[in-house]
Amino acid sequence: PLLIGVDEEGGNVNRVSLYKAFRAAPFHSPQSLYAQGGFPLVVSDTIEKAALLQSLGVNVNLAPVCDVSNNPSDYIYPRTFGKDAKQTAAYVKTVVETMNGRKLGAVLKHFPGYGSNVDTHTGIALDQRPYETFTQSDFLPFQAGAASGRGKTAVLVSHNIVTCLDPELPASLSPASYQVLREELGFEGVAMTDDLDMDAVQKYVEEGTAPVMALQAGADLVLTSDPQGGIPSVLEAVETGALTWDRLDQSVLRVLRWKLQLGLLSLPGAEDVQTS
């Protein structure tokens, strides 16, 4: 079965509950939920959200937002928990554990952490914060989500140019980002890009090259609004040897493991595949 995903964060990013045909009112933002009823309301909201999405055939929610922001002037602030790293990590842990219980795939975003950067939908975001800021703050919610997810979570990588990792490439296209995710954070699950048709990528790389660059860098899934443009470039890269089968097989196995862990596949010997 396919992984069917949607952005249903709550607040100003709701792709389903925004429409009254699916829910009387859109899901509230993380900040609003917590202010009204603390973590118990966050849990009940996540359970209701999972039930709605799964009733529609959706098995992955591109949430929770793990970005740390407590400054209302930040672009990403309304979508975040709005508190410090430790409190955000507690929120992420709560949401992920609840989603796991309902076998709804969680996606931790936007790695390595959005900070106070501008909107990458409309332009390039340059993040010049030191690496220590990430290890002491931004990484904490991702680590909490990954630990709670027990292999049932994915991580979405942003298009911010994080200079302490790579001064030239957006994180989604940079081998350094995936290396840190795998080696420093120990994440073994599926890593996906943010939408490669966002301006932060399209204004920065040659047309048609982003999907191949992302896979070469270490992404397992490539999100794009233009699959008809991306698929031929990936096929061509395989034919020319720019992408190897070994590299792609690593990603295929991660995706299959995720499907097994979400209960989408039932295969003989599946437990061995999950733990090997």
Image (spheres, rainbow, N blue to C red):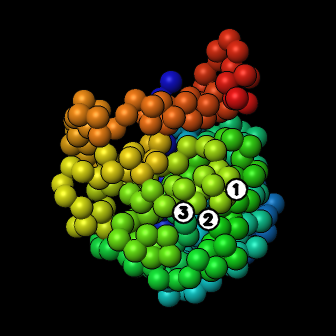
Residue 120: name its quadrant: bottom left
Element type where label 2 sits in the image:
loop
Q: CA distance from mark 1 to mark 2?
A: 8 Å
Pointer 1: what residue?
A: 145
Q: Residues within 10 Å of mark 1 (few under 14, many from 20)?
A: many
Element type where label 1 sits in the image:
helix
Q: Is residue 178 shown to the viewer in this render? A: yes
Asked whether, in this view, residue 258 is left or right of residue 227, the answer is right
Depth check, mark 3 against mark 2: the one in front is: 3
Q: Earlier in the sequence, mark 1 or mark 2?
A: 2
Name of the residue lying farthest toward the top:
268
Badge 3 amino acid: Phe
Q: CA distance from mark 3 to mark 1?
A: 12 Å
Tag 3–tag 2 contact (CB < 8 Å):
yes
Rendered residue at 81%/60% (across/down): 40
Q: Which mark is residue 111?
A: 3
Residue 143 lies, in percent from the top left, at: 70, 60
Name of the residue lying farthest toward the front:
241
Element type where label 3 sits in the image:
strand
Q: Earlier in the sequence, mark 3 or mark 1?
A: 3
Q: Quadrant of the C terminus?
A: top right
Tag 1–tag 2 contact (CB < 8 Å):
yes
